[in-house]
Image (cartoon, rainbow, N blue to C red):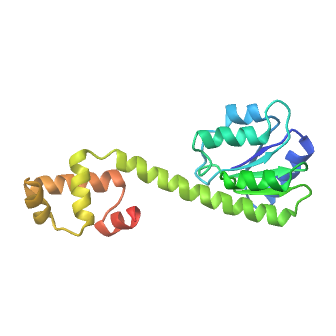
């Protein structure tokens, strides 16, 4: 989902049309507060990207970006700044602090949409990584020990000997690990966690 945060209706509508011409869903927000209340922590499975105007009434784009960064959301929701009032120091500063890109108005439509697609791809990767971390967090301490030994390439009998448990218990833990991690083989598991 492309989130367009700009106080100008014409800009929001034009950007939404551009996004839709590339098959990207878009939603516009007339204010930074509206965006922060409605979308800032709701993630789309197809990825999220924020096109953020720098100059807006009440809360400017840099302040919104700072809030997203403070919540550690900029990897799941990359920010591309759009502005008619930017300068080089502002662009450099926001990029150093983690903004995905910085465009000055007027901008090249194709270049902007190419960067949006790249940001959405990054967002999808970050979302997949977050999902794997949640699955890992669901493992018990013993399952984590078994997991580490499986990833080291050890057979169930060796895992049982090293942990001082029965081979049947290792098999049960292994089945729980595969189930929780949503994989069918040790090779899949290793690929997921590399």
Residue 137 as seen in the image, left or right of residue 95: left
The residue drawn where x is 27% and y is 65% is 151
Please provide percent x and percent y for residue 167.
9, 58
Of the pair 69 and 26, the residue shown nearer to us: 69
The residue drawn where x is 10% and y is 55% is 168
Of the pair 52 and 9, the residue shown nearer to us: 52
The residue drawn where x is 16% and y is 68% is 155
* Residue 73 placement: quadrant: top right
Please provide percent x and percent y for residue 53.
82, 45
User: Count the marks: how many?
Assistant: 0
Residue 25 as seen in the image, left or right of residue 176: right
Residue 10 as seen in the image, left or right of residue 51: right
The residue drawn where x is 92% and y is 45% is 10
Of the pair 140 and 180, the residue shown nearer to us: 140
Q: Is residue 127 above or below residue 9?
A: below
Residue at the front extreme of this rendering? 89
């Amino acid at each position: 989902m492309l989130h367009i945060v700009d106080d100008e209706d014409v800009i929001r509508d034009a950007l939404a049309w551009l996004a839709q011409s590339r098959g990207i869903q878009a939603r516009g927000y007339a204010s930074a507060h509206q965006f922060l209340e409605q979308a800032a922590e709701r993630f789309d499975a197809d990825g999220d990207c924020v096109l953020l105007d720098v100059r807006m009434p009440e809360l400017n784009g840099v302040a919104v970006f700072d809030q997203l960064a403070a919540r550690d959301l900029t990897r799941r929701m990359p920010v591309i700044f759009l502005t008619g009032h930017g300068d080089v120091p502002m662009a450099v500063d926001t990029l150093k602090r983690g903004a995905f890109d910085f465009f000055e108005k007027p901008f090249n439509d194709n270049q902007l949409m190419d960067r949006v697609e790249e940001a959405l791809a990054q967002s999808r990767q970050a979302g997949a990584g977050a999902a794997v971390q949640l699955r890992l967090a669901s493992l018990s301490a013993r399952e984590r020990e078994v997991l580490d030994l499986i990833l080291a390439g050890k057979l169930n009998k060796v895992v049982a000997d090293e942990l001082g448990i029965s081979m049947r218990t290792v098999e049960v833990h292994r089945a729980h690990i595969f189930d929780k991690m949503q994989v069918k083989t040790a090779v899949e598991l290793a690929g997921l966690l590399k």
